Image: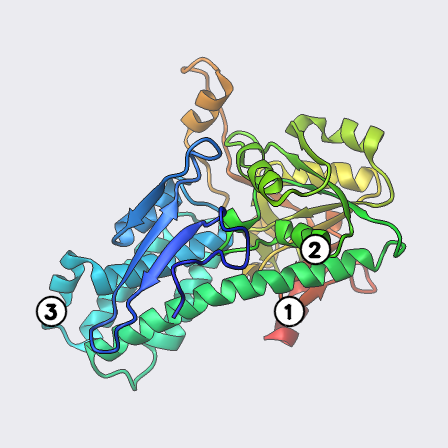
Amino acid sequence: MMSSDNSKSSANTLRSLIFTPSTSAHSPPSATLSVLDQLLLPHETKYIPIRCVQDAWSVIRTMQIRGAPLIAIVAVLGLAVDLTSYPSTIRQLEGLGVDEIKRVIVEKMEYLKTSRPTAVNVFNAMEELSTTILADSSLTTREELLSALMTHASYMLERDVSDNRSIGSHGADEILAKVDERTNVRVITICNTGSLATAGWGTALGVARELCSRGRMEGIACLETRPYNQGSRLTAYEILTEKMPNPCLLCDSMISSYLATKGSSNTVCIVGADRVCANGDTANKIGTFQLAIVAKEFGVDFYVASPFTTLDVKLKSGKEIEIEERPPGELLESSGAPKDMKCWNPGFDVTPAAYITGIITEKGVVRRSEDGTLDVEGFVEKMS
């Protein structure tokens, strides 16, 4: 079972969540969960207790927690806590048979899927629980079913940290293979893809961490990422906490001038992903497509770093991705605009595969085929 310190693989100050399962072998499974309110960072550190699936849904929807991997983990752990420790749910399950309990679980899982529709990780996490736990006919009692669900939720938490470290290792190997062994790398990233977006370590920022650990990073620049400023609030916070070399914060609109004046052959862009389609088209935080266009214009490699579970080969291209539109107030309040101003506030954009150099996962790197395409579908088939 996972200890409460999910951040032991990263800096102790960067705990995105605290999960404490019961360690007693003589009592029913139970746990507590709290998550870091990321809307208050970097000026205030406050943890929010998650007691039920409604609490989990709320912190995901309001972006008090965010990042595709972390969203999935909080949904899974929130479900486990709800089923084993929330008094109202415990009363609801009393006297029900296993099949009836499974129907209750499915209803809660479907509800959690509605929290953030663009991020595929939640859907994949719920599907994994369905195929590994709900489909297991050997679980014939309520206690066996809930214990198995709690155990698997804890396993998924541990696996997230391990997978992130593997993403970092594969990414660093891929990037360093393209530069002289005496040359260090300058990284550019957008949004937040570090310990605060995962259970620990990070995806795109995890690659940067690995480069740092090898002494091969010259510097790192992060885009502020309007309108919620995940780059300036969260990534800058992580960069300074980790003491990464030569940090630099950029407004989103500065990237062209930055690469024109400060870009070089050792510069590389690394971003995260909320969904990657069969052809390599990638949905990520709004502004990523813009960064990819500019990177291509200046001949800068542009990598996507994401868990294998983010590869959604059921969708053939980015045209099939549902793009979440956020409330107008998020943009109006953060920009100082008049309250009655009309605005458009999509949470994500889709970067076409043509702008992407490669896709880094914990199972390896999707590189361009001889015909210049990214065969994500073939990679998934090979690695599954």
In front of the other: 2 or 156: 2
Contact between marks 3 and 1 (CB within 8 A): the answer is no
- Along the viewing direction, whichever of 168 and 296 lies nearer the viewer: 168
Residue density around tag 2, few if under 14, some if 14–19, many if 20 or more, within 10 Å: few
Which SS class for mark 3? loop
Determine whether label 2 and label 3 are within 8 Å by CB.
no
Q: Is residue 242 above or below residue 290?
A: below
Location of residue 340 (image quadrant): top left
Q: Position of residue 100 (x, y in %)?
A: 18, 72
Q: Please provide percent x and percent y for residue 153.
A: 38, 67
SS type, badge 1: loop
- Name the residue rendered at 26%, 65% in the picture: 105
Q: Nearer the viewer, residue 312 or 98?
A: 98
Marks 1 and 2, how far apart at CA: 21 Å
Residue 166 on image: x %, y %: 63, 65
Which residue is tagged 3? 94
Q: Which residue is mark 2?
A: 213
Q: Please state if 64 lies on the left or on the right of 343 as rendered.
A: left
Q: Secondary structure at mark 2?
A: helix
Question: Which numbered disc covers residue 263?
Answer: none
Q: Is residue 38 above or below residue 281?
A: above
